[in-house]
Image (cartoon, rainbow, N blue to C red):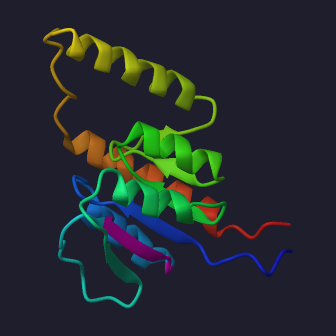
Amino acid sequence: MQTDRPAPLILVDADACPVKDEVYRVAERYGVAVTIVANSFIRIPDDPLIDRVIVSDGFDAADDWIAERAGDHVLVITADILLAERCLAAGAAVLGPKGVPFTTASIGNAVATRAIMADLRAGGEQIGGPAPFTRADRSRFLQAMDAAVRRLNKPRE
């Protein structure tokens, strides 16, 4: 068993994250540290396992901060497909706020779809936005995060 592995860590791309409370609950259950990363002040619980990092309001400042710290001991919570791609490349596990994990097998399609949608919007197409966040999304996120944290906590051989 490897003992020099860094402690598990959860990094949250927090500015528009609808599941911060769920992250806190699961992290507390497993005793895993959480860092909330945002461009402005976000209230966090008074808990020694939960930390807040406020980055500059520069373009992609939060994404850069998170991606620089992503690794095989990290679970990243984000809806940002390009950040997910960077974190997967660094070896991190990545979970979207609707409970859908980003994987190396799925990220290529997600990036391509994002590019197509951006092109359509740039061309003036009215394509709408993402579906509203639902109770089912919250439940799916809790289940997926629980499973991801258990995998993160599992000792490596």
Instruction: Indicate the quadrant where residue 64 lies.
Output: bottom left
Residue 115 versus residue 11 in the image, above or below: above
* Residue drawn 21% across the image and 9% down it: 123
In the rendered image, which quarter contains the C terminus? bottom right
Residue 43 location in percent, x, y?
17, 76
Q: Position of residue 129 (x, y in %)?
A: 18, 26
Q: Where residue 41 sits: x, y (%)? A: 18, 73
The percent coordinates of residue 7 (x first, y second) are 62, 78
The range drawn in magenta is: 31-37
- Indicate the quadrant containing the N terminus: top left, top right, bottom left or bottom right: bottom right
Q: Is residue 7 left or right of residue 119?
A: right
Question: Which residue corresponds to the image point at 46% horizontal and 61% vertical from the top-left?
Answer: 66
Q: Is residue 58 left or right of residue 126?
A: right
Residue 137 left/right relative to 109: left
What residue is drawn where x is 18% and y is 14%?
Answer: 127
* Residue found 36% across the figure and 59% down from its top: 62
Query: Magenta stretch: dominant SS?
Result: strand
Q: Nearer the viewer, residue 96 or 110?
A: 110
The verdict on residue 84 being magenta is: no
Closer to us: 32 or 62: 62
The foreground one among 140 and 49 is 49
**Furthest-front residue in view?**
58
Counting labels gives 0
Quarter of the image for residue 25 reads: bottom left
Q: Is residue 110 above or below residue 6?
A: above
Q: Left or right? Give the position of 105 relative to 107.
A: right
